[in-house]
Amino acid sequence: MNDFMYYNPVRVHFGKEAMGRLEEELAALGTKVLLVYGGGSIRRTGLYDRVRRALEDTGKTVWELSGAMPNPRTEKVYEGIDICRRQGVDLILAVGGGSVIDCAKAIAVGAPAQGDFWERFFKNWEPAQEGIPLGVVLTIPATGSELDQSAVITNWQTGEKNSYDSPFQFPRFTILDPTLTYTLPKNQMVNGIVDTVSHILELYVSPPDGENLTDALAEAALRTEIGAARKALEDPRDYEARANLMWVSSFALCGMLNNGKKTDWASHCIQHPLSALYDVAHGAGLSVVHPAYLEYICPQAAPRLARLACRVWDVDPSGRSQEETAREGLRRLKDFFWRELGAPSTLSQLGIPAESVPRLAAGADLSCWSYRPLTREDVEAILRSCV
């Protein structure tokens, strides 16, 4: 196992009564609040009214930034930064899924800084020196952003989708109430499941390969996610299934599954141009790209993928070579994504034409890989297999 440093300062309130802890968290932080959320779903479900009541009961002055979109864009971040600077906002509350949270994180580090947040942090990756405190009420389990220090923002004008890490982007607290996910549309639930599985695989399918606690936790998380997904698809109001989906998604990126691992993230780096250029939902893009990437590196990663096949997908290795075992596990992964979940399997299903492959490949970050380095030609080959 590689050396590591583990740190995660986020306070987590989990369960059916978790929303009851919102007021005490708000009472300890700030007086001028920027409330960040997406579309109208939190109004339709009544969550908006609950949050506003908690803000009013704790004496906050509130400004709102609504309309945070999937694949959050620079223009919405600039809008939030402007509000924070003009009004002296000292607390940001994000209510929504990963896109809302990432938008709020970028605002949190961008508002106190001089200059352009995109150029300084998401383009040149300068270390942030401070950040506005951030709280989260999660409604869509998918990205794990509620428990980590990363944010991903899309610059639609330049066709870039970049990530940025900073300890100032860790939320101070996160409210995780699984009942808030009961009303999620099926496609959002499916995208979240794919995203969660993909996150764990990015961490798990990487060196070192020896027996270690981090890998054992990843295997348990994958088995739990797969089982809970099947139950939630059958009964969307199955509390235990929803609770497991929410907690596995958060746990996947809390840092525990990184410890001692090289980690990969190649699939995410290949997928990001799909979102930046075609506004593809992240989970939907990963459903297409990640199995194709694993198939491509299977000869080099066969021992690790064979272990995944046996321990997560219950593949019997008897009479199979190591690579044959690995490929049977990948077949079951694709079957889970595409047949059981109904997630997309090709670029054409995402509305992406085959002729765009060279441009997509040109936008991929080639620094992310584990078992073999990737060239631009490799990325093109992976994407062409997805057509």
Image (tube, grey):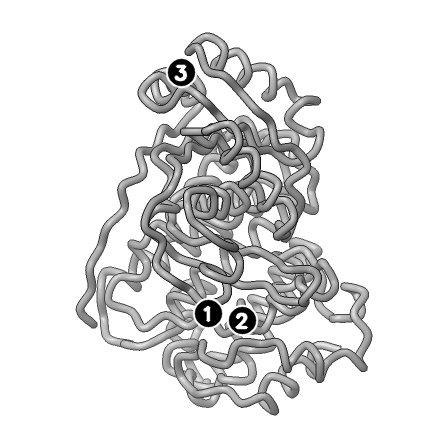
Q: CA distance from mark 2 to mark 3?
A: 38 Å
**Figure check: 54 above or below 334:** above
Residue 308 relative to residue 182: left or right: left
How packed mark 2 is, by other alpha carbons closer than 10 Å (few <14, some 14-19, many 20 or more), is: many
How packed mark 3 is, by other alpha carbons closer than 10 Å (few <14, some 14-19, many 20 or more), is: some
- Which residue is more in the foreground, 22 or 187? 22
- Which residue is more in the foreground, 376 or 306? 376
Residue 53 relative to residue 164: left or right: right
Q: Identify the residue position indicated by label 1 in the image.
A: 265
Q: Pointers 1 and 2 in contact (CB under 8 A)?
A: yes
Quadrant of the rendered structure where residue 287 is?
Answer: bottom right
- Identify the amino acid type marked 1: Trp
Q: Secondary structure at mark 1?
A: loop
Q: Secondary structure at mark 2?
A: helix
Q: CA distance from mark 1 to mark 3?
A: 37 Å
Q: Secondary structure at mark 3?
A: helix
Front disc: 1 or 3? 3
**Figure check: 369 above or below 313:** below
Q: Identify the residue position indicated by label 2 in the image.
A: 269
Kindly tell me whether residue 73 is visible in this rendering: yes
Where is residue 68? Give x, y as percent: 64, 41
Kindly tell me whether residue 245 is visible in this rendering: no
Q: Identify the residue position indicated by label 3 in the image.
A: 23
